[in-house]
Amino acid sequence: MNFESCNRVNYQKVGGKGLESVKEILINFISDEVRKFGFKKGIIGLSGGVDSAVSAYLTVEALGVENVVGVMMPYRASNPTSLEDAKLVAKNLGIKTILIDISPMVEAYSEMKEKGVDRIRRGNFMARIRMAVLYDISCKEKGLVVGTGNKTETLLGYTTLYGDSACAINPLGDLYKTQVWRLAKSLGVPKRIIEKPPSADLWAGQTDEGELGVNYILADKVLYSLFELNLTPEELILRGYEADIVYKIVDTIRKTQYKRVEPIIAKVSTATVGKELSFPRDWGT
């Protein structure tokens, strides 16, 4: 991974803060949120990727090694190196792990047995199976599911609704992918995990950047400029960004807005949940 390319866009600072400050904020966030609701444990889906590794490292710092459970959920077609890397993270941290092969669950649904099933459809189904497993384990272990999604994925809608986006708390949600890479390096995440091509591992050869049609470094430069610097698409183009890339990213953000909000409720009363009835998340605690 070319970290120097990240540096040129001022990714050493996150919201004006250095990595050590960000790390402290995230660790305190996890600790406060988990304990606020009367829990001690964090449950994390370990995919073998950098995002879940960073979430795991932070959660161990926040809750202690004895209070973190890493759940590995391979599918029969998963890349074996993904499981190896997930195990490496768990071993390095010394956390408890649970290994569950989701293949029988996925294929128990007759629709998934049909030939020619769309691979994106299958991938979304797998993500939702993993979500169900994580929440069942969170019930068994009496812990909260700690999310692993980053800001880039959220803004681009590169997530499965009620699948990998589902979690109780999300420490990485305000970090762009390139910022997660830098944080991973700071935390001591194994180099091979940081440097491998990001992939949801939904089918052989699948990569995030291949599906998105743009690499993360370029995507983050555009997103950072749009949302942190408040530049317009036209201003970005005047600064030398390709118009096709800029407008593709803006269009993707618009088309996936539904993934970033609660479902729309038909209003038939004077006190509708999410409108007149809108309470803070911590209301009642």
Image (spheres, rainbow, N blue to C red):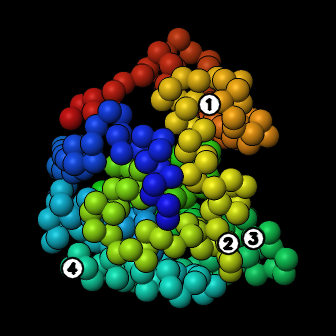
Residue 94 disc label: 4
Question: Are the residues tagged 3 and 2 within 8 Å (C-beta)?
Answer: no
Distance from disc 3 to disc 2, alpha carbons, whole Å, reads 10 Å
| Mark 3 or mark 4, earlier in chain | 4
> Of tags 3 and 2, which is closer to the observer?
2
Give me the residue at 36% from left, 45% from top. 12
Residue 108 in which image quadrant: bottom right
In screen coordinates, is 94 left or right of 207? left
Q: Is residue 83 above or below residue 179?
A: below
**Percent x, y for residue 258?**
64, 37
Disc 3 crowd rating (10 Å Cα; few below 14, some 14-19, many 20+) is few
Secondary-structure class at tag 2: loop
> What amino acid type should be assigned to the residue bearing mark 3?
Arg
Disc 2 crowd rating (10 Å Cα; few below 14, some 14-19, many 20+) is some
Give me the residue at 56% from left, 51% from top. 217
Distance from disc 1 to disc 3, alpha carbons, whole Å, reads 28 Å
> What amino acid type should be assigned to the residue bearing mark 2?
Gln
| Mark 2 or mark 1, earlier in chain | 2
Secondary-structure class at tag 4: loop
| Of residues 256 and 220, the one drawn nearer to the viewer in this rendering | 220
| Mark 4 or mark 2, earlier in chain | 4
Q: Is residue 212 above or below residue 112?
A: above
> Of tags 1 and 3, which is closer to the observer?
3
Disc 4 crowd rating (10 Å Cα; few below 14, some 14-19, many 20+) is some
Q: Which residue is mark 1?
A: 264
**Percent x, y for residue 134?**
41, 66
> Of tags 4 and 2, which is closer to the observer?
2
Q: Which residue is mark 2?
A: 206
Distance from disc 3 to disc 4, alpha carbons, whole Å, reads 35 Å
Distance from disc 2 to disc 1, alpha carbons, whole Å, reads 33 Å
